[in-house]
Amino acid sequence: DIFSILETRLFDSKWVKIETGRGISTLTLPNLFKDDEGLYTLRMVTKGGTAGHSAFVSVSDGPPPVPNAPGAPMDVMIHDANRDYVIVSWKPPNTTTEGPILGYFVDKCEVGTDNWTQCKITPQVGMSVPGV
């Protein structure tokens, strides 16, 4: 039996638990995030041939830490980083039941310290952060 998501094969790990035996296969994903939503497929190879079944897995956000607060940004990516700046982008939360996004707080921390400073509040889904 082979499990995959978006044509990427899944293997047993600390994030994916696959159990097979006695004609039963179980896929357990103990720590899903909104980014893990997608079409999951089970393909079975037997003496009689190959069969498969696909299902879309939808992941609900947990309750926001503050009532009516929007969800967390998704797909946070670093595009360029050096000693003077970092360029970061993200996608808006994939939720429809929370409050509207008015802006994003972007904070930075000095390497080797716990000193966080707020760089900017931005309405965009990406920005250049100077002085990192």
Image (cartoon, rainbow, N blue to C red):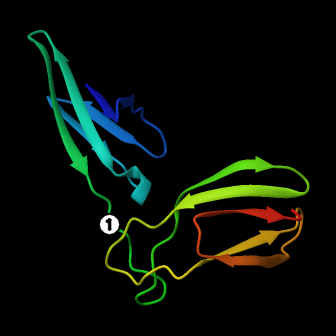
Q: Amino acid at mark 1?
A: Ser
The residue at 50%/70% (across/down) is 72
Residue at the location (26% across, 31% down)?
Answer: 20
| Quadrant containing the C terminus in the rendered view | bottom right
- Residue 90 lies left or right of residue 111; in this view the side is left
Give the side of residue 98 with respect to residue 42, left or right: right
Left or right placement of residue 9 versus residue 117 in this view: left
Is 100 in front, or is 21?
100
Residue 15 lies, in percent from the top left, at 46, 46
Residue placed most toward the observer, 40 or 12 = 40
Residue 101 versus residue 21 in the image, above or below: below
x%, y% of residue 130?
84, 64
Quarter-of-image position of residue 89:
bottom right
Residue 32 in view of the camera: no
Q: Position of residue 49 (x, y in %)?
A: 12, 12
- The residue carrying pointer 1 sits among few (fewer than 14), some (14 to 19) or many (20 or more) residues within 10 Å by Cα, namely few
Q: Residue furthest front?
A: 124
Q: What percent of the width, then of the height, locates residue 109?
A: 82, 69
Residue beneath the point at 45% across and 74% down: 71
Q: Residue furthest bottom?
A: 67
Disc 1 is placed on an element classified as loop
- Which image quadrant: the N terminus? top left
Quarter where residue 110 is shown: bottom right
Q: What residue is drawn where x is 42% and y is 35%?
A: 12
Question: What residue would you read off at disc 1?
Answer: 60
Find the residue positioned furthest to the top: 47
Residue 14 appears anywhere in the view = yes
Is the residue 29 above or below the residue 108 in the image? above
Residue 43 location, quadrant:
top left
Q: Work out whether residue 26 or residue 75 is closer to the camera in this orientation and state it.
A: 75
